[in-house]
Image (cartoon, rainbow, N blue to C red):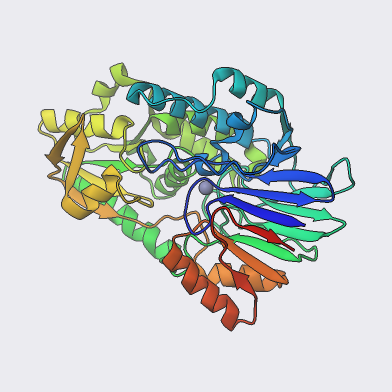
Amino acid sequence: MELTFLGAAQEVGRSCIGIESDGLRLFMDAGVATNRDTPQLPLQNLKVPHAVALTHAHLDHSGFVPAIFKHSKPPVLTAFPTIPLVNMLLDDMQKILEEKGLPEYFSSTDAKQMNRSFLGLPYGKEYEFFNGSLLKLYDAGHIIGSAQIYFKSKEGSLLYSGDINSVQTQLHRPATIPREEIDYLIMESTYGDREHPDRKKLTKEFCKKVRQGLEERASVIIPCFAVGRTQEIMLILLENGLIDKTVIDGMGLRASETYLEYPSYLRNSEKFEEAFSEVGKCRGGAERKKFIKNGNVILCTAGMLDGGPALSYVQKFDAKGIATKMFLTGYQAAGSNGRMLLEKGQLKINGKIVNYIGDIEKFDFSAHSGKKELIEYAKDMSPKKIFLVHGDKDQMVALKNSLIEEGLDAKMPITGEKVVL
Ligand SMILES: [Zn+2]
């Protein structure tokens, strides 16, 4: 069996791993890195795959899939909810590329062909390839439809974690631990050297700050990633009696409608339906002015404030003289507007740098396992070898050392590296 790390090795973004085993060539994920001006693509030094297996919809795992269809038409095996969400995120990215005047790396014909080639799989069900190799998806607990990929051929077995969360959230059950014997584990390491704050305490603190903002007659803007974070925050606001003050706007609203279509993938779908029916909904710019008033909670994209309705809300509240507070709820990549807000209190709006005058808070509602959980997960699997991917180098080095201390064999491949097992 041979593994080729085509991206996300000692970096986050453009996840893509090639497996060649017993005549079969399989890609696990094919993503693009979107935290730079132009999307960074995975390396293309392997021949076209016979099949693609996709862990989840986030573009750093899925954004390159349509480009594969320029040269071939492989089946794309993934969990059902991933299919509409990939389409939504790709449409949005194409729109952004067009607006910025950047070249497209796939056409709408490629995307159409991709859609004809999706093969939805339930968790835990075996898929058999032409040579008898097997593939199975297991719930990864990260976003709706997120999966770990189990692969077995005559030459051995492996598990690729994708993005994983083994802690239960409002929205999702924790990741399932596969019971099969695993020879090789390919594991994400986003939080390889960090623990997350206690979720209950964090939720309490977050809701306290939201209430405080409303009592001060400010409006609270909560920038959120469309898929996953928006829905988790909706449930938290419902549980804490704040949903009737909340308005949802942008792509998170469309993503939430997809969440409603797959209730069995949620830990508590009734609660989510309740949150969705009670939250205020803004469907586009013209409706937005209705919601520019004191004491509103605005849940909107973009999570890192690069585009989306969030910036338009900042301007509109400002123009009306209504104070706002900005509560960030996720990772803010270097170079993003959100990172600049945290570091300098400034935002880039329509190409101009402006000072943001409201309070800024950041809450770590991560959908990734922290250090302790990653180590537990690896120990549970006790594979012959672990390959760390999807992490900044400092996080990976720390995790690798901790795994070695536990008696496990952990490696940090570089992008482009081929490993013969
Ligand atoms: Zn993800």
86 and 199: which is toward the camera: 86
Farthest-out residue, left: 321
> What residue do we see at 29% from left, 16% from top?
286
State left or right for residue 139 relative to residue 58. Answer: right
> What residue do we see at 18% from left, 50% from top?
359
Q: Residue 420, image x and y in percent?
A: 72, 61
> What residue do we see at 32% from left, 60% from top?
205
Q: Residue 169, image x and y in percent?
A: 52, 55
Farthest-out residue, front: 45
Q: Is residue 212 visible?
A: no
Residue 306 vs 332, above or below: the answer is above
Q: Quadrant of residue 145?
A: top right
In the rendered image, which quarter contains the C terminus? Answer: bottom right
> What residue do we see at 62% from left, 64% from top?
387
State left or right for residue 160 relative to residue 62. Answer: right
Q: Residue 328, image x and y in percent?
A: 31, 49
Total numbered labels placed on residues in the image: 0
285 and 186: which is toward the camera: 186
State left or right for residue 149 relative to residue 283. Answer: right
Residue 379 vs 54, above or below: the answer is below
